[in-house]
Image: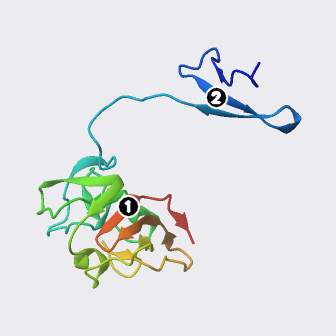
Amino acid sequence: DMATNPIVVIPGVAVPVIVTPQSKGSAIIQAYGKGAVGPPGTGAVFTKSFQNGEVFVIQSGQPVKLNNVGQIKLAQADDLANRAIGITSSMVSSGAFVDVILLGPQIQADWTNATGGSANLTIGAFYYLSVVAPGILSLIPALRTGQIFQYLGKSLGENELFIEIGQPVIA
């Protein structure tokens, strides 16, 4: 009887639950348990290492695309072939390898090279791939016919961008 013994064991559920009866035969079920214990984390970051295929340095925080031989180059919203796959985690010389952030936070003190002008991000703003210049984060998405609209991430602070590369859409 749930009224006198609200803690029940449900077959297939590994933790005890409390069932609070509601009206019309429904109930609120709360599960209680303890997960694995480990050190506190800072959030998962998914990266992959790629070689810089440009003949110049790619700066930290810049959106990049893949070329036809699997190297990275600066991404731009002018054509679907130039869509972003991630954001560089650090500065990288031509021919060198760098981790590209595919999903997760990127924190850096100065975003000037990635924004094309502002050292700080706009807190709470959504950032898109720029159509104006390659390798630039933009507050304004590309909307003209033939350009691509691609969401790149959201600013969680003036120095932190949570990267979540969106599917490009042709305008």
Disc on the earlier residue, 2 or 1: 2
Q: Can you give x and y, in whole percent of width and height, for residue 108 in the image?
A: 22, 67
- Report the residue at 32% width, 31% height from top: 37
Residue 71, by quadrant, is bottom left
Number of labels in the image equals 2
Residue 18, horizontal then vertical, whole percent:
64, 28
Residue extending furthest toward the top: 11
| Quadrant in the picture for the C terminus | bottom right
Q: Judge by depth and name the residue closer to the eye, 67 or 15.
A: 15
Q: Residue sitting at 29 percent across and 79 percent down?
A: 120
From the image, which quarter does the N terminus lie in?
A: top right
In the rendered image, the vertical position of residue 153 relative to residue 50, given as above or below: below
Query: To which residue does mark 1 refer?
Result: 162
Would residue 97 appear left or right of 102 to someone viewing this image?
left
* Residue type pointed to by label 1: Phe
Q: Which corner quadrant of the image does residue 85 belong to? A: bottom left
Cα separation, mark 2 vs mark 1, equals: 36 Å
Amino acid type indicated by mark 2 = Ile
Q: Position of residue 105 (x, y in %)?
A: 33, 57
Q: Is residue 128 above or below residue 23?
A: below
- Of residues 66 and 120, which is closer to you in this image? 120
Residue designated by label 2: 18
For disc 2, the neighbor class at 10 Å (few under 14, some 14 to 19, many from 20) is some
* Residue 58 horizontal side relative to residue 4, left or right: left
Residue shown at 44% from the left, 29% from the top: 34
The extreme front residue here reads 4
Name the side, left or right, on which 50 lies relative to 26.
left
Considering the numbered disc 1 on the image, is that residue within a helix, a strand or a loop? strand
- Report the residue at 21% width, 66% height from top: 60
Residue that sits furthest to the bottom in the current view? 117
In front of the other: 55 or 57: 57
